[in-house]
Image (tube, rainbow, N blue to C red):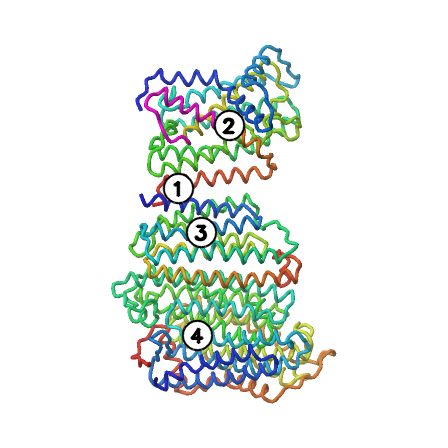
Amino acid sequence: MTTNPINTLIVLSVIITLFMLTTSRILVLVRSAAILGVLLGLFPFFIHHGAFSIHTIVLSSLGIIVKGVVIPMLLFRAIRSATNFRETRPHVGFSLSIVCGILITLISFGIGSKIPPSLFLPSETMISLSICITMCGLFLIMARSTALAQVIGYLVLENGIFTFGVSLPTTQSLLVELGILLDLLVGVFVMGIVIHQIHREFDSISTDALEALRE
Amino acid sequence: MTSLWWHALFPFVLAFAGAPLLLGIIVKTKAFFTGRVGAPLLQPYYDIVKNLSKTSIYSTTTSPIFKLGIVTVLAATCGLLVLLPVGKCGSLISFEGDIILFVMLLAIARFALVLVALDTGSAFEGLGASRELFFSALAEPIILLSLVALCKSGHIFSLSAVCGIHAPHPGGVSLLIGAALFVIVLVENSRIPIDDPTTHLELTMIHEVLILDCSGPDLGLLEYAASIKLWIFSVIVAQVLTPFHAASFLGDLAITLGGMVAVAVTIGIVESSMARLRLTAIPQLLLGAGALAIIALLLVNGAFA
Amino acid sequence: MKPESLIVFLPLIVCIVSTGLAVLVPKFSTMLRISIVNAFIVFASSLVLAFLVAVHGRLSCFGNQLFLDHLSALHLVLVTLIFLVGSVYGLWYYSSSEQNDLKSARASRRYGGLWNGFLLLLILVLYANNLGFLWVMVEATTLVSALLILTHQSAASIEAMWKYLLICSVGIAFAFAGTLLVSIAQSASPAASQSHLLWTSLADNAGFLDPNIMLVAFIFVLVGYGTKAGIAPMHTWLPDAHSQTPTPVSAVFSGVMLNCALYAIIRFLPLCEASSGFVGKGRKLMLALGLVSMVIGAIFIPTQKNLKRFFAYCSIEHIGIMCIGIGSGGIGAVAAMLHTIGHALSKSAGFCATGILAKAFGTLDASEISGALKRSPVGGFLFFASILLLCGAAPGLLFFSEFLTCYSLFENEHYSALGLFLITALIIFFGMLWRGIEVTFGSPSPKSIAVALPWFVIVTLCSLVVFAGFGIFVSKPFYHFVVDAGKIIEHGMIITSMRFQ
């Protein structure tokens, strides 16, 4: 019955990702991204059939701490620095967003079922889940007009790629996890700095203001 | 599940007798949350009897469709009862593909109600009719998806799959479909957060305004039909969400009735704790329910290993 | 420790030391001088390393984690040369700038740390044997260069930086997925060696890798690193980023950073090709994307008013030509390497000339500039010469490489690609030349001032133009070196390596 907890985690991850597509309230987005990160961080426990080796514990806890605590802290700091923050209308409306989210889920699970099973690739569900989360992250970047929401879309994108590697054998998943964590941490840190700069310059962090250089 | 043909009569008759009781439970729950005693539990019965004893007044713009439509609404809704399976009792009639007939009867009932409304020629009813059709158009595929997911998990393409959820993933599928269908209950029966049944402002009504110009027995029949519809949806949601079954068919019936009371109380709690959603936000709610139904369908299809 | 391995470590040590010094020193001009010394030492050692590679073949050290072969040595020399040019030019550019925001100690420390750190990271990208390490270094260069864009803070530069950061971060994430897939392919192959994700062992055992996984990995890598390389249609950050940075940084971006991203892609290409038995699917993809880049260049170059954006779109076009050369294979890979060299030299000269013109005329808008040759002879000459070179005028190096590219397209029977290449190159030729003539000749605009250039700047820039301009007369050993680099792109050529401590 080890497949059941994995299924619960997968279903919850998909629900949270789709939920993030429907809201533009920044605090809700940050919290859902944190929950998603924690959920994905729990995967190694169940995928390696409950093996509580030191490696799994360290990896999982590192992932959970970074994605559930450190990065939301960085983001909350960036939000606080944007003092007159106001939600702006996204480029793609909410109803269309969730329709696209549903389409993305169907496409990704369709693609996942077409891939021939192989001993070295992750299982087909994990591939589908990773494609789903990655594409939803990309969609968030495209559809939102606030710089912070785009950073969260980037977070979700990286989480999707993380999901792909998390079910690989342990030596490779180490590479994956550390690489992604490093990338996320530094990336979000730099983006936080940039958002502060944007806010200072434009007095808002809506990227609609960043259109002077268009062709 | 062995069931004798006359077992199915129990819930059928019970539905006719007990449907307005659910409305009473909802009103009592709302009263409890606002610290009032509220109307008596049997108040909906008194209202329906009161309406039946009055005379109908018909507007001069109406045609024979008006009277025909009202009767069609009640007939279609009672037709749904014939198909509805309850626990081990089963349904009076069940065959392969009867979920399509189920959804069709719902659609016929809705269509007839809208015709009745439009027949009066009033602008308020037109407004209500367009809103009702829009939200129901979004809700119908969700009902179909949820029922199909239930059928796939029960390995039988009929409404009787509602009675027993089989492996794999019984828990997940039940929860997801139950959540989606609960939203549908709120939509189809015009409860908050979709529509406020107690409002008196016609511009904000959806369902109430469709029956605005009905009076007397017509109004009584339409309100009775609405309560039967609530009964039907509550039965489905209760069966999806209750995971256990009793040995005898009476015990099963009792469990389902208990579940329905729980659903009615939950609706009352939802109505007391939420305000009405903006009309533009209702499609998003429905799409969210649709997403849950699709995930349930994927789960049942074995997309998750 | 053998002396040769010391030379491999020398650029790294010098860069680290000078980054530290640059961060500590408060004065801007001192920091610039430190950068020049650093770049010079690194350039000299890269020349020595290239010579060693030519003599010995592949160099590897640090437990095979760092290595140099002809391909990376070529890029190393190029990177360090352009950095040297950029540092020398920067000494004059920033000193004669009226803007005071760089004179503060904090800004000077920041710029010094970022500039020298950027050089260090680029060298590490070229040294990397482990593909995961390569990814980390490319990611680090993205973050450092994003902060460099912000040197002069303005609304436009913040916008350019935000676009750059977001688009390239997404690209790098995809490149990570590609690297991951390569690692999966490696563990799935029966001859998986102990050295995980090392390019040298992957290249040696490439025949055993799963072709489908490698193709999907290559697609991810092409899209991912291609975003950083400015391959269309992932190029959208390029014009903004290149136009909003100060000129030395633009020169480095165009001449060096794009090349390093392309280098990362061509590390993966022979693995993909060899695993599928040299069928050529990966190369076809590069050819297609190269053609798209050229079309984008042809559409946007003739209409650009801002001179820096003009050169930026020109970079997109030239990256496209390089991709076409690599994609068509055979002599095309050699052509692409020659093109890399020629483009880096001419583009740096072009950007530096734009900087001189901007100082002279006070604007970057081409419609307001005319008579550059009369107002600032060096600037005007450099500008027009670089435009001629970039168009592919003989006897320039770019002419030679474009000719070889066409030849290889013809040889490999990609006739429609050849036709499209020639048409777009023609359109770009006309567009660039028109703009060049408009700016360079005629009577000088009234609001311009004469600009005095120090001798070292003139010597550096003119030597760039001379070397790129007489490329047809390349010397034999140099040409053999480039041919060896081309062979590595084709086959991941195995040369017997000499291992150092």
| Residues tagged by mark 3 and mark 4 found on one chain of the structure | no
| 2 and 3 marks in contact (CB < 8 Å) | no
Mark in the foreground, 3 or 4: 3
Q: Residue farthest to the right? A: C446
Q: Position of residue C332 (x, y in %)?
A: 40, 74
Q: Which residue has dot 1 on it?
A: B298
In the image, is residue C497 part of the stretch drawn in magenta?
A: no
C-alpha span from label 3 to label 4: 34 Å
Disc 3 element: helix
Q: Which residue has dot 3 on it?
A: A38
| Residues tagged by mark 3 and mark 1 found on one chain of the structure | no
**Depicted A184 relative to depicted C366: above or below:** above
C-alpha span from label 2 to label 4: 66 Å
C-alpha span from label 1 to label 4: 46 Å
**Depicted C83 relative to depicted C182: above or below:** below
Q: Quadrant of residue B212?
A: top right
**Depicted A104 relative to depicted C150: above or below:** above
Labelled disc at residue B265: 2
Q: Which residue has dot 4 on it?
A: C124
| Residues tagged by mark 2 and mark 3 found on one chain of the structure | no
**Which residue is more in the foreground, C5 or C90?**
C5
| Residues tagged by mark 2 and mark 4 found on one chain of the structure | no
Labelled disc at residue A7: none
